[in-house]
Image: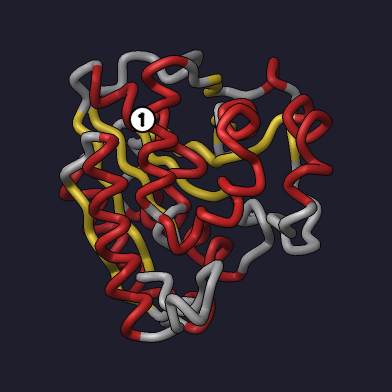
Amino acid sequence: MRGLGSARRILGVWAHPDDETFLSAAVMAAAVAEGAVVACVTATRGEQGSTDPDRWPAGPVLAAVRSAEMAAALGALGVTDHEWLDYPDGGCADVDPAQAVERVAAAIQRADPEVVLTFGPDGMTGHPDHRAVSGWVSAAIARTGGRARLLHAIHTTEWMRAYRSIVDELDVFMGFEPPTVPVSAADVYLAAEGSLLDVKLAALHAQTSQTSALLDHLGDDLARQVLAEEAFVEAR
C-alpha cells in the first residue's frame, strides 16, 4: 500500500453499509493486520435499497438485514469499533447539519484518528447522502482542530478505462460522472491481491443484499480484478 505511512489510528465515516467495504476494505484490513486501530462510523442503516426488494423489502426488515451484514463484513476485516448514527437512508441531506457535524466530531474525538477516510464532495456517485457525509466530516475535522489527515475516496483513470463499461451495465454510478485521477496522482493507493483481496471479497459477500447482483454479474475472476483497487486523494 502506497501513501498511508505509519498511521496507527484510522477512522472511516460513510453513508451506508457497504460503502466502507467497496471503497476501503483492503486498506482497513491491511491496517488492522499491521496493528493499527481502525474504527468506522455509518450514517444510515441503508434501509431503502437492496438488489432484490421482494426478498429484502425496504424499511425495518432491510435495516435489520443490513445491520447484521455490516457486522459480518467488519468482522471479516477485523474491525470491532463501529458506530451507527441512525439517520434516514436517503435523508442525510435533510438532517440538521449542525447536529450531524457535532456527532461526527464526537466520533473523531473519541477515536483520535491520524487518518480519516470518507467521500469527496462529489460523493463518488453524486448520491446526496454521500455528499452530506463528506461535508459533515470536513466540518467536524475543522471543529476538532484539523489534526487528522483527511482522505477522499476516488477511482483512478486507469481503473475507469478498464472497467467503466462493465460497471455501467449495473448503473453503479447512477448516471453521475465521477472524478478520477491517474494512479500516480493518488495520495494513497492499494491494489489488493492474495489473502488481502480474499478478505475484501469475503466482506463483500457478507453484504448479500447489496452485492449479490454485482458479484454474480462479474464472476469470481473478474471480481478480483474490478474490486482490487482502492485509491484516495488528500482533501484540498
Q: Quadrant of the C terminus?
A: top right
Which residue is rendered at x = 78% and y = 59% of the image? 176
The residue drawn where x is 44% and y is 83% is 57
Q: Nearer the viewer, residue 204 or 95?
A: 204
Q: Nearer the viewer, residue 172 or 111?
A: 172
| Quarter-of-image position of residue 63 | bottom left
Closer to us: 84 or 78:
78
Please give left or right for residue 75 compared with residue 90 in the image. Answer: left
Up/down of 57 relative to 192, above or below: below
- Which coloring applies here? secondary structure
In this rendering, position of residue 85 left or right of residue 201: left
SS of the residue at dot 1? helix
Q: Which residue is mark 1?
A: 199
Determine whether 37 is above or below 126 in the image. Answer: above
Residue 143: horizontal and vertical position, in percent?
A: 34, 55
Identified at 54% across, 41% down, the residue is: 152
Residue 203 position within the rendered picture, expressed as x and y whole percent measured from the top left: 36, 42
x and y percentages locating residue 93 in the rendered image: 53, 77
Residue 208: image x %, image y %? 43, 57
- Give the number of callouts: 1
Which amino acid type is marked by label 1? Val
Check disc 1: other Cα within 10 Å, few if <14, some if 14-19, many if 20+.
many
Please give left or right for residue 97 compared with residue 113 in the image.
right
**Taking 146 as reference, is 72 above or below it?**
below
Residue at 55% across, 27% down = 228
- Residue 63 higher or lower than 160, as above or below: below
